[in-house]
Image: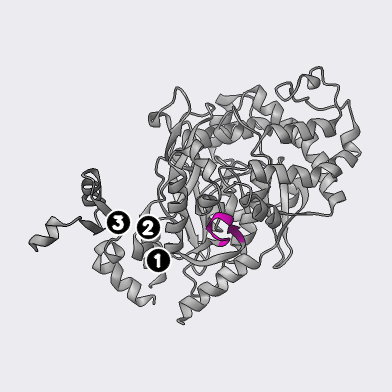
């Protein structure tokens, strides 16, 4: 673990873009992946989507 | 493949096979089935006079004066509120109109025929920039321009399109995407191709040879001093007007897109969106398998760049039928084809690619007619699937003009607008019943 932080960090960030932006501002290489929970995390909508498969 | 997936493949196939051809020009009440003297069509989903926003009210009032039903704004407002005039969405009459989208009974309209599936779609004439009816302006300058469009411009291009034996609109759109247009907010290439196609026939029209005629003359001195003093032929004036207005082709393009969307409507089990439209108060969508039912939510204010002297405080809610372009896979969905557009609506060329890439997440197919050279000629993302919109939490990306909230001021900017997610959720609930 210790060696990880001694080497150059290359980060993949998923979801909230703010984390990627902060690391980017500090010069860290970041690949941001846009991701959010399916159906915005709404169980009711997920069950409707299941019906429409 | 599930029955829904099969239905969506069928719907998007029908959309892409549609072959819209501009075949004629005619008076709305003579050519649009169901159109009548007291019916005024407007953009977006259904709305009553009391809920209409400023630009739509202005366009209705201007239309009433233009039709001779009212002498001034006061009379027009009273008549509009009286219940004697019927209002209906353009979409209910296979028509589309940009911004307020008002089509009055006497106005001349483009007639587009779907040569693959049959049937006709319609749109009005584009008036150009500045003070225009579609933004709710209706002073004498606006009304005189409308008269010139109906009494000079329309008969000339009607004769021309007959001589041309039709103009293939899909071909023009496909070529324009290779020339930097998105087909919604940027129409410079589309209009250039449109003019190039019709100009030889305009020059050959009998109407176009007239240098004197009993109709209002349009001041075209902004195009060239040559036109000062009204000595030019009608054909030269028509071509000069077309050249002065990058949006000349927009209304015919929209009617062509309506033709494609109509071809995809009515496929049982399909969850594909076949209508998106805004009236300045509400945004509405319709879905292939849910008939004429609208799913609506309050229209958002577009986010974009404002002309000097204006801010978002001046902006009206999102308005216009022009989002029919995104419905069939161009406009905001083809942003990557039009990187220059970011000068007009904000952002960077990389954002334009991001926008198009994101739309593949919520669509059914890559278009086999419209493609993007800079993406290895990948087809544009086409056929919005309500299920994917809700599942991914991504709404369609729409390029749009921004109207001032007060009637008559005109366009105050351009940008991007996000349609409300609530409409897609409401559609999903209906589809799941």
Q: In this figure, which residue is indicated by the disc labeled 1?
A: B388
Q: Residue at x 52, y 48 (%)?
A: B44
The disc numbered 2 marks a residue on which chain? B
Residue B300 appearing in the image: yes
Viewer-side label of 3, 2: 3
* Residue B295 position by quadrant: bottom left
- Rate crowding at label 1 as few (under 14), some (14 to 19) or many (20 or more) other CA atoms within 10 Å: many
Q: Residue at x 51, y 36 (%)?
A: B344
Q: Are marks 2 and 1 in contact (CB under 8 Å)?
A: yes
Q: In this figure, which residue is indicated by the disc labeled 2?
A: B394
The disc numbered 1 marks a residue on which chain? B
Residues at marks 3 and 1, CA–CA distance in whole angstroms: 24 Å
Residue A49 shown left or right of residue B170 in the figure: left
Front residue of this view, candidates A33 and B430: A33
Viewer-side label of 3, 1: 3
Q: Secondary structure at mark 1?
A: helix
Residues at marks 3 and 2, CA–CA distance in whole angstroms: 20 Å
- Tell me if residue B152 comes above or below residue B73 in the rendering: below
The disc numbered 3 marks a residue on which chain? A
């Amino acid at each position: 673990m210790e060696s990880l932080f001694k080497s150059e960090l290359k980060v993949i960030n998923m979801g909230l873009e703010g984390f990627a932006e902060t690391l980017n501002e500090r010069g860290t290489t970041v690949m941001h992946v846009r991701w959010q929970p399916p159906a915005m995390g709404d169980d009711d909508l997920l069950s409707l989507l299941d019906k429409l498969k | 493949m599930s029955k829904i997936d099969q239905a969506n493949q069928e719907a998007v196939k029908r959309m892409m096979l549609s072959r819209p051809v501009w075949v004629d020009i005619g008076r709305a009440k003579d050519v649009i089935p169901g159109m009548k003297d007291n019916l005024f069509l407007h953009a977006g989903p259904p709305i009553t006079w009391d809920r209409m926003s400023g630009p739509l009210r202005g366009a209705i009032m201007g239309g009433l004066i233009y039709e001779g039903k009212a002498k001034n704004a006061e009379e027009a407002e009273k008549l509009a509120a009286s219940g004697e005039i019927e209002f209906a969405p353009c979409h209910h009459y296979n028509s589309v109109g940009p911004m307020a989208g008002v089509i009055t009974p006497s106005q001349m309209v483009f007639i587009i025929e779907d040569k693959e599936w049959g049937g006709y779609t319609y749109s009005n004439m584009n008036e150009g920039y500045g003070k225009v009816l579609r933004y709710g302006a209706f002073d004498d300058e606006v009304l005189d321009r409308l008269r010139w469009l109906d009494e000079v411009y329309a008969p000339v291009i009607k004769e021309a399109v007959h001589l041309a034996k039709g103009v293939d609109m899909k071909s023009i759109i496909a070529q324009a995407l290779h020339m930097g247009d998105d087909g919604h907010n940027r129409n410079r290439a589309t209009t250039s191709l449109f003019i190039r196609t019709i100009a030889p026939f305009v020059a050959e029209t009998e109407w176009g040879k007239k240098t004197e005629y009993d109709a209002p003359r349009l001041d075209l001195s902004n195009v060239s001093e040559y036109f000062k003093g009204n000595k030019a032929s009608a054909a030269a004036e028509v071509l000069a007007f077309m050249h002065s207005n990058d949006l000349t082709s927009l209304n015919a393009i929209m009617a062509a897109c309506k033709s494609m969307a109509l071809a995809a409507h009515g496929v049982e089990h399909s969850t594909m969106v076949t209508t998106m439209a805004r009236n300045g108060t509400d945004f509405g969508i319709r879905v292939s398998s849910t008939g004429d039912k609208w799913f609506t939510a309050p229209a958002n204010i577009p986010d974009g760049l404002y002309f000097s002297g204006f801010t978002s405080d001046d902006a009206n809610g999102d308005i216009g039928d022009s989002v029919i372009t995104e419905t069939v896979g161009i406009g905001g969905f083809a942003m990557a084809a039009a990187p220059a557009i970011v000068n007009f609506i904000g952002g960077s060329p990389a954002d334009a690619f991001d926008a198009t890439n994101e739309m593949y997440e919520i669509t059914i197919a890559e278009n086999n007619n419209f493609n993007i050279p800079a993406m290895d000629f990948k087809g544009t993302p086409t056929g919005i699937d309500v299920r994917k919109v809700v599942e991914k939490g991504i709404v369609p990306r729409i390029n749009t003009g921004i109207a001032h909230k007060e009637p008559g001021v005109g366009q105050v900017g351009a940008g991007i607008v996000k349609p409300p997610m609530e409409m897609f959720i409401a559609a999903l609930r209906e589809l799941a019943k």
